[in-house]
Amino acid sequence: MRKTFKLDEIDCANCAQKLQDAICKLDGVEKATVNFLTQKLTLIAADDRFDEVLDRVVELTADIEPDCEILR
């Protein structure tokens, strides 16, 4: 499954890259892209695990970029 989410308050391109690299390392993530200019996260993960993976992505985002929020 592939879904795109709006990001709120990602501060810089470096932060976006750091977040993307960390998300891509999570178990269950097939591919992830974080676009600083459009303030969007595109996440690809297996359909049957998507919600579980997304929950971990949200937690990781809060750890790495506390001001950034994934708008679902």
Image (cartoon, rainbow, N blue to C red):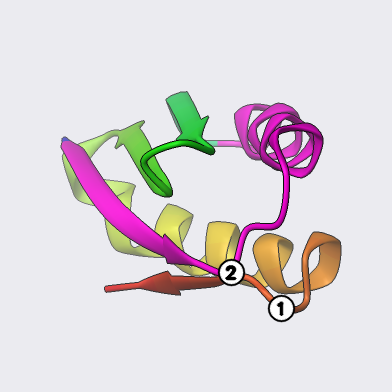
Residue 56 locus on image (x, y percent): 58, 62
Label 1 residue SS? loop
Mark 2 or mark 1, which has the lower sequence index? 2
Q: Nearer the viewer, residue 39 or 5?
A: 39
* Residue at image coords 61%, 36%: 27
Q: Quarter of the image holding residue 41? A: top left
Q: Nearer the viewer, residue 32 or 26?
A: 32
Q: Which mark is residue 47?
A: none
Disc 2 from disc 1: Cα separation: 6 Å
* Residue at image coords 67%, 62%: 61
* Residue at image coords 71%, 78%: 67
Q: Is residue 24 magenta?
A: yes
* Disc 1: which residue: 67
Q: Which mark is residue 9?
A: 2
Residue 70 locus on image (x, y percent): 44, 69
* Residue at image coords 70%, 34%: 13
Relative to 43, 59 lies left or right: right
Q: Magenta region: which residues?
A: 2-27
Relative to 41, 3 lies left or right: left
State whether residue 9 is above or below residue 25: below
Label 2 residue SS? loop
Residue type (three-letter) at the residue carrying disc 2: Glu
